[in-house]
C-alpha cells in the first residue's frame, strides 16, 4: 500500500516550495471510511472540529446551518452528525427534527453547544440526539463518543 502526502505550496518573498512525498510500507493512520457531518454557524468551531476529526482519521463534511447541512447529508450520506444547537436559520432542535424525519438520513446526532441550560440538553436528547456536549468539548470524550456511536451503528 502506498500513501502519498502533499503539502500546500509555502510562499516566501522569493521562494516557492512544494513538497510531495510517497511512503510505502510504513505504518500510517489510514483515513476511515466513516464520514462525519459537522454543522455550526461558527467558522472557528467548524475548523477546529474538522482538524480534530480528520486527525482521528475521519472524513469530514461541513455545514453552516440546518438546511445546507441536510442537503450535504443527502449528497454524502454521513455516518454521524455533530451539530450546534444555537444557529440562526435552523436551530439544533429543528435540525434534529429534519434528520429524524428524513428516511435518507440515518445517522446518530451529537449536539455540541455553548448553551448551558440542562433542560435544553434534555430537549435535544428527547428529540433524538445520541449525546450532548458543552462547548468547548473535551476532545478525548468527544472522540470516544464518536467512536462508540460509529462502531455501534
Image (cartoon, rainbow, N blue to C red):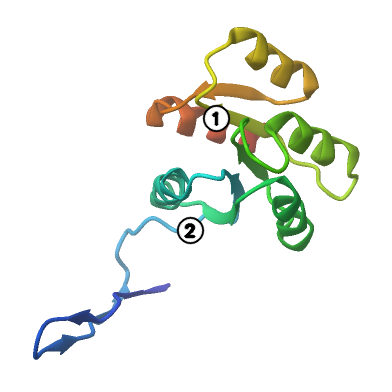
Q: Nearer the viewer, residue 83 or 24?
A: 83
Residue 102 in view in this figure: yes
Residue drawn at x 77%, y 25% as measured from the top left: 128
Position in image of residue 143 (x %, y %): 47, 34
Q: Which residue, as the protein is rendered here, is positioned at the far front?
A: 88
Q: Nearer the viewer, residue 38 or 92?
A: 92
Residue 153 in view in this figure: no
Residue drawn at x 48%, y 29% as measured from the top left: 142
Position in image of residue 10 (x %, y %): 20, 78
What kind of element bears circle 1? strand
The image quadrant of residue 89 is top right
Residue drawn at x 57%, y 43% as measured from the top left: 40
Q: Which mark is residue 31?
A: 2
Q: Please say if 19 is above or below 151.
A: below
What kind of element bears circle 2? loop
Residue 36 falls left or right of residue 101 = left
Residue 62 falls left or right of residue 99 = left
Q: Which mark is residue 112?
A: 1
Q: The N terminus is located in which quarter? A: bottom left
- How dense is the environment of label 1, judged by Cα within 10 Å: few (below 14), some, or many (20 and up)? many
Q: Which residue, as the protein is rendered here, is positioned at the far left?
A: 14
Residue 3 falls left or right of residue 104 = left
Of discs 2 and 1, which sits in the foreground? Answer: 1
Residue 98 falls left or right of residue 138 = right
Mark found first going from the N terminus, 2 or 1: 2
Position in image of residue 8 (x %, y %): 30, 77
Amino acid at each position: 500500500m502506498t500513501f502519498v502526502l502533499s503539502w500546500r505550496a509555502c510562499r516566501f518573498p522569493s521562494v516557492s516550495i512544494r513538497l510531495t512525498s510517497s511512503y510505502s510500507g510504513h505504518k500510517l493512520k489510514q483515513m476511515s471510511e466513516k464520514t462525519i457531518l459537522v454543522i455550526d454557524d461558527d467558522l472557528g468551531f467548524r475548523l477546529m472540529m474538522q482538524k480534530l476529526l480528520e486527525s482521528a482519521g475521519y472524513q469530514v463534511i461541513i455545514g453552516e446551518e440546518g438546511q445546507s447541512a441536510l442537503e450535504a447529508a443527502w449528497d454524502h450520506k454521513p455516518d454521524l452528525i455533530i451539530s450546534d444547537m444555537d444557529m440562526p436559520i435552523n436551530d439544533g432542535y429543528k435540525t434534529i427534527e429534519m434528520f429524524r424525519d428524513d428516511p435518507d438520513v440515518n445517522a446518530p446526532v451529537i449536539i455540541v453547544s455553548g448553551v448551558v441550560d440542562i433542560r435544553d440538553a434534555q430537549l435535544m436528547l428527547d428529540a433524538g440526539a445520541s449525546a450532548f456536549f458543552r462547548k468547548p468539548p473535551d476532545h478525548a470524550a468527544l472522540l470516544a463518543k464518536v467512536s462508540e456511536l460509529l462502531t455501534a451503528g
